[in-house]
């Protein structure tokens, strides 16, 4: 059992009673997915407010807002686990639900990273803004390569920086930044995602290349 599966099992034990309650009152997975997006939009608003405060020279308030944004991202990330579990336990899985979930996941990630990019630039960390853009690019490409691979009939889940890891790194880095007042924590998180997400994207491309070679060789 890999570490992600082990952690998921622990979280599922904790949230199963909540899931049963949601099923009882008629909450659907698509509702939960949408709430998760709204949470991330809220986190983005906090990052934008932090960017404006940083631009005014009010770094202490900017860092505090950054920490709160990280906490909101972490809370919104729980909805990303709840919607899938709710769909399975409530027998509410559907092709559209899967599409809705994947689409809003991309929006959620891009808007929060955009907020961080803006914060970096307004705080005078221009090159860290560039790095954050690279993190955005890598995040999108990790998901895109998997989706394209699955369209070709290839399972493609390899790599080090999948969405749950990216969400945790972003949230924790922002929270520690808020607690310490040191922007380097958030910068370090963006560097980690920028490097590992793009490595993961190309890792997946290489994996698909090998799988396609094997498949073509069997034909």
Image (spheres, rainbow, N blue to C red):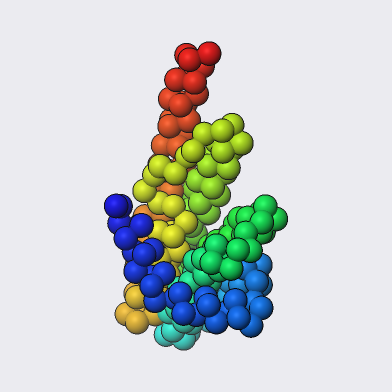
Q: Nearer the viewer, residue 69 or 92?
A: 92
Above or below 15: residue 149: above
Which x, y percent locates residue 123?
48, 71
Which residue is at 48% across, 30% downward?
A: 208
For image coordinates 62% across by 68% down, the residue present is 29
Q: Residue 13 in the image: state x and y as whole percent.
A: 38, 72
Query: In front: 24, or 12?
Result: 24
Residue 92 coordinates in the image, percent (x, y): 63, 63
The answer to whether residue 141 shows anywhere in this view is: no
Instruction: Classify 179 as above or below 168.
Output: below
Q: In the image shown, does 96 or 62 lie closer to the viewer?
A: 96
Q: Is residue 105 visible?
A: yes
Judge from the rendering whether residue 187 lies leftward or rightward of residue 76; answer left or right: left
Instruction: Tell me: residue 58, above or below residue 148.
Output: below
- Does 35 sit left or right of 55 as displayed? right
- In the image, 127 versus 49, the foreground residue is 49
């Amino acid at each position: 059992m890999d570490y992600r599966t082990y952690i998921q099992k622990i979280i599922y034990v904790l949230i199963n009673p909540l899931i049963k309650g949601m099923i009882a009152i008629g909450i659907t997975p698509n509702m939960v997915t949408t709430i998760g997006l709204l949470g991330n939009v809220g986190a983005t608003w906090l990052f934008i407010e932090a960017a404006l405060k940083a631009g005014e020279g009010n770094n202490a308030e900017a860092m505090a807002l950054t920490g709160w944004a990280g906490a909101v991202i972490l809370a919104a990330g729980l909805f990303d686990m709840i919607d899938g579990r709710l769909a399975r336990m409530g027998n509410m899985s559907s092709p559209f639900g899967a599409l809705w979930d994947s689409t809003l996941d991309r929006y959620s990630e891009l808007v929060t990273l955009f907020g961080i990019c803006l914060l970096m630039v307004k705080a005078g960390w221009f090159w860290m803004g560039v790095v954050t853009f690279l993190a955005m690019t890598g995040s999108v490409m990790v998901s895109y390569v998997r989706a394209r691979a699955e369209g070709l009939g290839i399972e493609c889940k390899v790599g080090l920086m999948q969405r749950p890891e990216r969400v945790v790194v972003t949230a924790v880095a922002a929270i520690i930044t808020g607690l310490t007042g040191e922007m380097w924590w958030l910068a370090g998180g963006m560097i980690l995602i920028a490097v590992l997400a793009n490595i993961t994207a190309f890792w997946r491309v290489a994996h698909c290349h090998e799988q396609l070679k094997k498949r073509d060789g069997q034909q």
